[in-house]
Every structure is written in structure tokens, then in C-alpha cells.
Image (cartoon, helix red, strand yellow):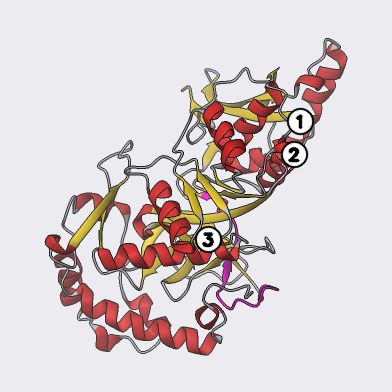
């Protein structure tokens, strides 16, 4: 059995793959002439398909931002008639006007194929039973994974989000071997199993497909240990369809970004200039196969890097590192730039630390400060205050080494912090 879902595409020599991208880019620029937003831009700049001769020519065109999508809400970026579209997905809009992406049937079919390719790369096969614990509806993770699983031929259990007792019952009853689950909920489920005396090794699960929220390598390893699975990282965003933009293969050495469907750039978020391979910057993506609402040079605000070299699996599509945070998630405390992921990386590397933590930003009357509330595993939360004080000092010292100032660290009992069966809320601003 081949290790590739589509061997011709996945192992295409780099020169051929880049030539394919250039051809598709020229076709995309021509198609974007049907979008009022892009047509006006191209006319103003004197650009068109004839302006593209190589991938470097992409930089002649302007970036597209979330603000552009919000300003064009709901149909202003369509490149086809609305009658040709069969589905739309929208962001929550919690920080402003929602962003909407519309899809033709061709777009949906292509997305399902990309998702099937992604799952296959992570070791999922037709014989697997996949349980999808993501929410359905406007959130792209649910339907994206679902369609990809069915395209691959897996028996698919659309469990949806929440109701952990039922999730675990389904896994036992149906012999579920693959779960799509966000990292924070995977840790919550592990805590639930421990609380109810259920040995994770008795679950039929062998693979967890995780994503939808940034997480560290330490969190991935904790998920693997607590649930007794192999956990594979994935990347996507609703503006690029949803999941299926990039996926880890079984080697777990970065996510293969499917370059026949997307052109990826990594730029300096301040200057917009390209970053060398291996250096962290903001990911910018261009859709190559979408008809309904294609996007050109979309600034994701996600921070990552291209991983140099080729993967041992033989796929030629470049790999990106796990998302290290968002360009707009940076905290400035005591004049120091801090990303929440730095704090998670430290906490999840400490054996005594549980699955949950909260970062609180507050003002002490003079300046902003940081307090980290950390759950301690039950077997380590003992009455010996000296042991707890020693653990608190060790966590504080490790955090100081990472973020270069001393945060307040508060140890709390296991399962005492608020939990969510959706995306975890890790940062609370009390200012």
C-alpha cells in the first residue's frame, strides 16, 4: 500500500511543482478580474496575468487582510455569481464584523480531497473509524474533517463538540480508532478519564488529529502520553477553507503545506519583506484552486517558519513549523514582549503541572504585571507546604528564564480552574 494519497502530486519535483504554481497563479489573477475588489486593485496598479512570469512576481501584488474581508461583508469579494455558491462559512465575529467565505461545489470537492490527503499522510486509512469532536455549523473544522474522512472512506462519527461522557461511550461502542480533537479538549478528556478511573489504554484510539488552537510540542507529547495515542498537528483557517492547508505526516517533523493548492510566503510582520527559510515570521497564503472567493496574499497573522530540508517521507511540499502564536497575540509586560505559547511551553514540560492554566494580566497600580495560575496534578498537591513552595519556585525560575522577568505564580488544585469543551481561554485581561 502506498504511503501517499496522491503520489504524483505529493512527490512532484520542486521545479515542476513551482511551474504548476506559476501557471495556476496566472489563471488565478485572470479569474480575480471577476471580483470587483481585486479588479479595482489590478486596474489601479496596472497589473494582470501578463505580469506573472515567476513566483517572485507575486510580490508585485498587494496583501489582502481581514479588514478587507470585513469591509466587503458579505459578498463583496465574490469572483463568481452568488448563484454558483453552495455553502458559506463565517468567523464568530467576536472582535468585529464576521468574515465570510463562500464556496462553489467545485471548491467543496477540492477541499474534501485535500482533507483526505492530509488524513492519509497522518496514517489514517479507509479501515479506520473517525470520531469528529469538533463543532459543526459555521466552524470549518467540523465539516472540513467530516468531508475529508468520508472522502477517504472512513466510517465517520459526527459526534460534535462537548458531552465528554457520550464522546467516550461512542469511542468504546463503535471502536473508534481516530479522533479529531482540539488540544485543550484532549487534555480535558484525559482528566475526565483519570477522574472516572478509566485507563486510556483500554480505548481503541490510536491517532488523535489535533489543531484549531496554537499549542506547543510539550502539549502534544502530554496528549500522547495521557491518551496513549500518536497526535498529529494540523493547520488551517476559515479564510483558506479551514483544515487541510498543512498537515503532519507520520514522521511528525513539521506540517506539509499543500503547495499545489496554496502559495505560502513568510514575511516580517512589520515590514512585509520575505523572511529566510528557518526564521519565524507571519504566514501569508494565496489560494490557487478556489473559484467562489479566492484570496491573494492573505495575511493570516499566524507566526511560523519554513522548516529547511526535505522530510524523510519523500513528500516534496515544504513544511511549516507549528504555529507559534499570532502577530497580534503578543503581550508587552514590563517592557518585555511575551507570547502565551512561551509560557505554555515551560508549564507543559513540568511533570507536576496538570492540564490547565490561566495567564492573568493585571495592573498593580504602577505598571502591568503577569500572574500565572497553574493546576498541580493531584498526586503532587500535598499538604507539605515546603514541597509546594519548592515547586512554585521552580516554575517561577523556569518562566523567568524564558520570558526574562519574574511573573507571579499561583498553584491551585487539579481541576479547579474553569474548563471549556471548546477552545481554551488561556489569557484573561484584568486591567
Q: Which residues are magenta?
A: 309-325
Q: Dot 2, how many residues are within 10 Å of its Cα: few (below 14), some (14-19), or many (20+)?
A: few
In which image quadrant can residue 29 be found?
bottom left
Disc 1 to disc 3, how far (Cα)?
29 Å
* Label 2: element kind: helix
The residue where tag 3 is placed is 281
Evaluate whether residue 333 shows in this view.
no
Could you tell which of marks 1 and 3 lies nearer the N-terminus?
3
The residue where tag 2 is placed is 201
* Label 1: element kind: helix
Question: Mark 1–mark 3 contact, CB under 8 Å?
Answer: no
Q: Disc 2 vs disc 3: which is toward the camera?
A: 2
Could you tell which of marks 1 and 2 lies nearer the N-terminus?
2
Evaluate whether residue 70 shows in this view.
yes
State whether residue 89 is above or below residue 168: below
Q: Dot 3, how many residues are within 10 Å of its Cα: few (below 14), some (14-19), or many (20+)?
A: many
Question: Mark 2–mark 3 contact, CB under 8 Å?
Answer: no
Disc 1 to disc 2, how far (Cα)?
30 Å
Q: Position of residue 326 (x, y in %)?
A: 49, 49
* Label 3: element kind: strand
Q: Disc 1 vs disc 2: which is toward the camera?
A: 2
- At a point 67% along the width and 49% down the height, the residue shown is 206
State whether residue 16 is above or below residue 99: below
The residue where tag 1 is placed is 395
- At a point 59% along the width and 65% down the height, the residue shown is 121
Disc 2 to disc 3, how far (Cα)?
39 Å
- At a point 72% along the width and 46% down the height, the residue shown is 221
Q: Position of residue 147 (x, y in %)?
A: 40, 56
- At a point 57% along the width and 32% down the height, the residue shown is 169
State whether residue 260 is above or below residue 248: below
* Membership of 4 in magenta stretch: no
* Relative side of 421 to 99, left or right: right
Amino acid at each position: 500500500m502506498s504511503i501517499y494519497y496522491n503520489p504524483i502530486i505529493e512527490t512532484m519535483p520542486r521545479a515542476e511543482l513551482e511551474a504548476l504554481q506559476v501557471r495556476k497563479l496566472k489563471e488565478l489573477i485572470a479569474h480575480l478580474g471577476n471580483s470587483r475588489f481585486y479588479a479595482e486593485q489590478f486596474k489601479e496598479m496596472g497589473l494582470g496575468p501578463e505580469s506573472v512570469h515567476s513566483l517572485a512576481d507575486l510580490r508585485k501584488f498587494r496583501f489582502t487582510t481581514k479588514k478587507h474581508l470585513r469591509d466587503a461583508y458579505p459578498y463583496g469579494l465574490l469572483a463568481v455569481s452568488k448563484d454558483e455558491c453552495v455553502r458559506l462559512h463565517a468567523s464568530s465575529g467576536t472582535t468585529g464584523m464576521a468574515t465570510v467565505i463562500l464556496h462553489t461545489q467545485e471548491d467543496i470537492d477540492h477541499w474534501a480531497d485535500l482533507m483526505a490527503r492530509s488524513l492519509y499522510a497522518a496514517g489514517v486509512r479507509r479501515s479506520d473509524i473517525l470520531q469528529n469532536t469538533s463543532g459543526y455549523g459555521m466552524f470549518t473544522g467540523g465539516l472540513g474533517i467530516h468531508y475529508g474522512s468520508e472522502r477517504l472512506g472512513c466510517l465517520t462519527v459526527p459526534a460534535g463538540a462537548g458531552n465528554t461522557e457520550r464522546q467516550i461511550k461512542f469511542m468504546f461502542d463503535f471502536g473508534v480508532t481516530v479522533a479529531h480533537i482540539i488540544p485543550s479538549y484532549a487534555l480535558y478528556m484525559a482528566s475526565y478519564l483519570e477522574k472516572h478511573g478509566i485507563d486510556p489504554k483500554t480505548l481503541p484510539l490510536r491517532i488523535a488529529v489535533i489543531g484549531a488552537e496554537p499549542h506547543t510540542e510539550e502539549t502534544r507529547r502530554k496528549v500522547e502520553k495521557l491518551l496513549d495515542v500518536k497526535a498529529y498537528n494540523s493547520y488551517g483557517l476559515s479564510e483558506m477553507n479551514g483544515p487541510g492547508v498543512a498537515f503532519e505526516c507520520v514522521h511528525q517533523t513539521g506540517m506539509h503545506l499543500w503547495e499545489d493548492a496554496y502559495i505560502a510566503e513568510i514575511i516580517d510582520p512589520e515590514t512585509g519583506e520575505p523572511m529566510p527559510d528557518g526564521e519565524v515570521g507571519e504566514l501569508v497564503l494565496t489560494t490557487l484552486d478556489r473559484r467562489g472567493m479566492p484570496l491573494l496574499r492573505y495575511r493570516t497573522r499566524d507566526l511560523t517558519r519554513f522548516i529547511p530540508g526535505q522530510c524523510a517521507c519523500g513528500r516534496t511540499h515544504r513544511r511549516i513549523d507549528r504555529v507559534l502564536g499570532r502577530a497580534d497575540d503578543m503581550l508587552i509586560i514590563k517592557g518585555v514582549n511575551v507570547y502565551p505559547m512561551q509560557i505554555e511551553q515551560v508549564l507543559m514540560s513540568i511533570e507536576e503541572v496538570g492540564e490547565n492554566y490561566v495567564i492573568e494580566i493585571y495592573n498593580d497600580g504602577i505598571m502591568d504585571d503577569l500572574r500565572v495560575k497553574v493546576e498541580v496534578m493531584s498526586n503532587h498537591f500535598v499538604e507539605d507546604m515546603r514541597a509546594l513552595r519548592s515547586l512554585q519556585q521552580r516554575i517561577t525560575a523556569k518562566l523567568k528564564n524564558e520570558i526574562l522577568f519574574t511573573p507571579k505564580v499561583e498553584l491551585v488544585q487539579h481541576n479547579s480552574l474553569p474548563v471549556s469543551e471548546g477552545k481554551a481561554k488561556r489569557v484573561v485581561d484584568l486591567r
